[in-house]
Image (cartoon, rainbow, N blue to C red):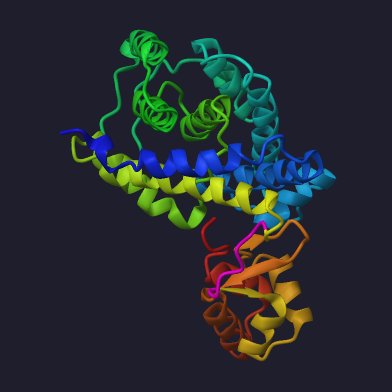
Amino acid sequence: MDYFRIMDFKKLDFMKSKLDALRPLNQDILANLEQWFEVELTYSSNAIEGNTLTRHETALVLEKGFTVSGKPLKDYLEAVNHRDALILMKHMVHKKGFLKEDIFSIHKMILKGIDDSHAGVIRSVPVRISGSPVILPNYLKLPTLLDTFIQDFTATTDHPVKQAALAHYNIVTIHPFIDGNGRTARIIMNLILMQHGYPPAIIRPQDRLRYIKSLEKAQLGGSMEDYFSVIETAVLRSLGIYIKAFTQKPLVDLSPHLLKIGDLAKQTQESVASLRYWTKIGLLEVSTTTPSGYQLYDRHQIERCAKIRELQKQRYTLDEIGGLMGGLMGG
């Protein structure tokens, strides 16, 4: 069965043609957009892997160089490293394709200062994915599997989005490293997209479960339809964001399910000051931030506010409430 039939290449090509028609792109808008994507890609990719920095905290780390009180040093390093890996990736965009050494270079940046002994080094031990029945390749087969993957990729003439999706899938399935495979795979996917004039695709934290389950389903021999749907949706979303930005429309769609802090205050009857403080200490999660700095919340935060007040009435401190509520949502 051709699982790629479910990828709408005509729609992808149509959206790409709309973006191409806007070229040459306004450099001021492009710089703003690239900065926004740098934060979004870093926050999203790390959050999928369990990093606890919020989107706002990630922006502070990347744009101001701040560390975040109460957060592990590892989370700070992961943010800085991912940003640096994105910068390294951008230097590769002018090339055609990539080499095995490029994968190692990106992975080395991802684990820099976190696990230097394994950074950019093929694993030499068996590993398992926690909570998953997927059996990963024997480490003795990894050099051959990587060489075959690179050879197949170099020879392909497939649609760029298909190439990017398959490269991502193959890297996470080969699982060449002890840690950092997912982040490396997502950066390689975006390298391929950008080499073909596409914007980078963001796998959002709220899509984490669907994304992981779709990968697992394919790795266990099932249909790849769900996985390719996740990738296609992410690519189309980024194309839409770019097109809106360069046609003077809002960069972020202020959908009805997203609330500005003032709207959240009205819905919860809490003060804006309280909501800002709860956000600052990690009790509330910002869904997205517009380039102009507006923080937007999803409607789940209404229930979260009610829970915070309920626990306060039971005389719990805010620190204790953070522990009881499991800290950040989606971290």
Residue furthest front as drawn:
21
The x and y percentages for residue 224 are 26, 39
Which residue lies at the image location 55% right of the left edge and 51% below the top edge?
240
The x and y percentages for residue 23 are 67, 36
Q: As drawn, is 265 to the left or to the right of 64?
A: left
Residue furthest left as drawn:
1
| Closer to us: 291 or 83 | 291
Which residue lies at the image location 62% right of the left edge and 81% below the top edge?
316
| Closer to us: 236 or 120 | 236
Q: As drawn, is 139 to the left or to the right of 177?
A: left
Q: State which quadrant residue 207 falls in.
A: bottom left
Q: Is residue 121 visible?
A: yes
Residue bounds of the magenta highlight: 251-257
Q: Quadrant of the C terminus?
A: bottom right
* Dominant secondary structure (helix, strand or loop) of the stretch shown in magenta: loop
The x and y percentages for residue 202 are 53, 45
Whether residue 104 is in magenta: the answer is no
Q: State which quadrant residue 287 falls in.
A: bottom right
Q: As drawn, is 104 to the left or to the right of 113?
A: left
| Closer to us: 321 or 155 | 155
Q: Is residue 265 above or below residue 89?
A: below
Which residue lies at the image location 35% right of the left edge and 16% below the top edge?
139
The x and y percentages for residue 291 are 74, 56
Q: Is residue 255 above or below residue 264?
A: above
Q: State which quadrant residue 249 falls in.
A: bottom right
